[in-house]
């Protein structure tokens, strides 16, 4: 089961580097890692200015040349959030999503906001690739049941289950939110409001609570506008006391070749400032420099 989320094409800030020479990049990375002190500027320059496909070629050639995995060397020579973002950059997208899901569901408690973000914002193809990576990992964790069925256009059934009925039939909401195209789902939102005089999101928020509410609201937001949903996630990750670096890293890395240009535009529209300026004020050091390079300046 997965959500039919629309994905922008060619709206990323990171693209294939022209005249890409894998041997030159491997040599530069080796010098940066094996020299006296790690040259962080080189790591940032190479890894943020190549597409993920090119980074996979670099990682393969690096291992062939050194007998060591690039991710392992990055883990050994860097630390903290900077290490996390560099390792994320050299990880294949499906493996990275899989790792994020595993981290979210293992240990004490489940990081439901992470699961919600990933499963609500990924396309069918991405979810399929994540699932295959999950199965290939031979992970012992019980597969999460948080993914609900996709949105459908049964407008009156939604209304009967929610606004018009005493109490809420959550099963109906889940069943109704299933297996339709994005245009149909968007029309569902319009028709629901015509019938109930409230938006579907408002009904979910008034009729439900907890993780189910959060998940279904996220699905509705992603049906309307994935970049706007992720812009809001970025804003919240940098707002208030402390920064949620894991969310920042995940969104900036995973969307850098998909729709980060659109996320930047939605962020500015919603919050009146740029992601780049927020990163400048909220995130420092080599970690901040890496995210800013991924973002690109949009002032």
Image: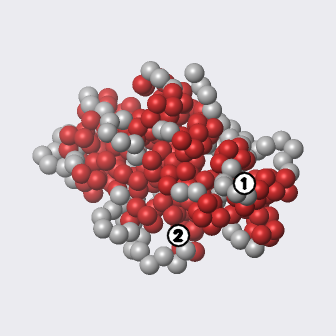
Q: Residue at x 53, y 69 (%)?
A: 134
Q: Earlier in the sequence, mark 1 or mark 2?
A: 1
What crowding class fits label 1: few (fewer than 14 Cα within 10 Å), some (14-19), or many (20 or more)?
A: some
- From this viewpoint, which residue is outermost toward the front? 36
Observer-nearest residue: 112 or 218? 112
x and y, in percent, of residue 111 in the image:
35, 58
Q: Label 2: which residue? A: 134
x and y, in percent, of residue 289 in the image:
59, 39
x and y, in percent, of residue 5 in the image:
51, 46
As drawn, the label of residue 32 is: 1
- Up/down of 198 relative to 107, above or below: above
Does residue 136 appear left or right of residue 119 in this picture? right
Give the mark toward the camera: 1 or 2. 1
- Up/down of 273 relative to 241, above or below: above
Res. 67 image quadrant:
bottom right
Q: Residue at x 27, y 57 (%)?
A: 171
Observer-nearest residue: 168 or 63? 63
Quadrant including the C terminus: top right
x and y, in percent, of residue 257 in the image:
65, 43
CA gap, disc 1 to disc 2? Answer: 33 Å
Observer-nearest residue: 164 or 137? 137
Secondary structure, mark 2, is helix
Does residue 229 appear left or right of residue 176 in this picture? right
Q: Residue at x 46, y 62 (%)?
A: 101
């Amino acid at each position: 089961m997965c959500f039919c989320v629309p994905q922008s094409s060619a709206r990323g800030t990171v693209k294939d580097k022209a005249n890409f020479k894998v041997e030159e990049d491997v040599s530069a990375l080796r010098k940066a890692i094996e020299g006296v002190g790690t040259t962080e500027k080189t790591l940032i320059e190479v890894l943020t200015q190549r597409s993920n496909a090119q980074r996979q070629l670099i990682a393969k050639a690096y291992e062939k040349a050194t007998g060591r995995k690039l991710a392992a060397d990055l883990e050994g020579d860097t630390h903290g959030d900077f290490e996390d973002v560099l390792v994320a950059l050299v990880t294949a997208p499906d493996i990275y999503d899989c790792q994020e899901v595993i981290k979210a569901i293992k240990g004490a408690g489940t990081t439901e906001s992470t699961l919600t973000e990933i499963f609500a914002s990924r396309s069918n193809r991405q979810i399929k690739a994540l699932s295959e990576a999950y199965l290939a990992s031979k992970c012992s964790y019980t597969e999460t049941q948080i993914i609900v069925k996709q949105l459908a256009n049964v407008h009156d059934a939604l209304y009967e289950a929610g606004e018009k009925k005493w109490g809420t039939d959550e099963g109906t909401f889940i069943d109704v939110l299933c297996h339709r195209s994005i245009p149909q789902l968007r029309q569902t939102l319009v028709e629901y409001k015509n019938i109930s005089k409230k938006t579907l999101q408002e009904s979910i928020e008034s009729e439900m609570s907890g993780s189910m509410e959060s998940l279904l609201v996220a699905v509705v937001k992603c049906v309307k506008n994935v970049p706007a949903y992720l812009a809001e996630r970025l804003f919240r990750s940098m707002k208030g006391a402390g920064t949620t670096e894991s969310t920042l890293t995940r969104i900036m890395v995973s969307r850098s070749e998909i729709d980060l240009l659109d996320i930047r535009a939605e962020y500015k529209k919603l919050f009146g400032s740029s992601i780049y300026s927020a990163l400048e004020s909220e995130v420092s050091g080599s970690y901040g420099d890496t995210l800013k390079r991924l973002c690109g300046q949009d002032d």
